[in-house]
Image (cartoon, grey):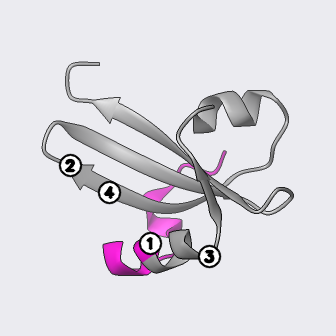
């Protein structure tokens, strides 16, 4: 997984929401699980939430967005 936030493909949360309208989205399996199963993921957005961060990754081979949540307490 390319986890470098500076390489973000999408410039804003609005852009992410528009992207999600035209692509499948799965929070389960998580992005880490998808990568472990051999899917090639590209980082597209980091959403900083109140109690943690949600990272979004795109997989071209199955046209799906996967996400991963990291809680402040983790």
Q: Is residue 69 visible?
A: yes
Residues packed near mark 2 inside 10 Å, few (<14), some (14 to 19) or many (20 plus)? few
* The label number, if any, that marks residue 49 in the structure image: 2
Residue situated furthest top in the rendering: 74
Looking at the picture, does residue 61 appear above or below residue 8? Answer: above
* The label number, if any, that marks residue 47 in the structure image: 4
Check contact, mark 3 vs mark 2: CB within 8 A. Answer: no
Q: Is residue 9 visible?
A: no
Residue that numbered label 1 is attached to: 16
Disc 2 and disc 1: Cα gap in Å? 15 Å
- The answer to which of marks 4 and 3 sits earlier in the sequence is 3
Instruction: Indicate the position of residue 50 as horizontal and vertical percent values.
Output: 13, 44
- The answer to which of marks 1 and 3 sits earlier in the sequence is 1
Name the side, left or right, on which 30 lies relative to 48: right
Q: Is residue 7 magenta?
A: yes
Camera-side mark, 1 or 3: 3
* Segment colored magenta: 1-17
Q: Is residue 59 magenta?
A: no
Which image quadrant is residue 29 in?
top right
């Amino acid at each position: 997984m390319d986890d470098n936030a500076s390489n973000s493909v999408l410039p804003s949360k609005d852009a992410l929401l528009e992207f999600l309208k035209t692509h499948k989205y799965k929070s389960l399996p998580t992005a880490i699980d998808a990568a472990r199963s051999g899917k090639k993921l590209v980082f597209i957005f980091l959403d900083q939430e109140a109690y943690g961060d949600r990272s979004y990754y795109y997989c071209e081979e199955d046209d799906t967005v996967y996400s991963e949540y990291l809680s402040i307490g983790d």
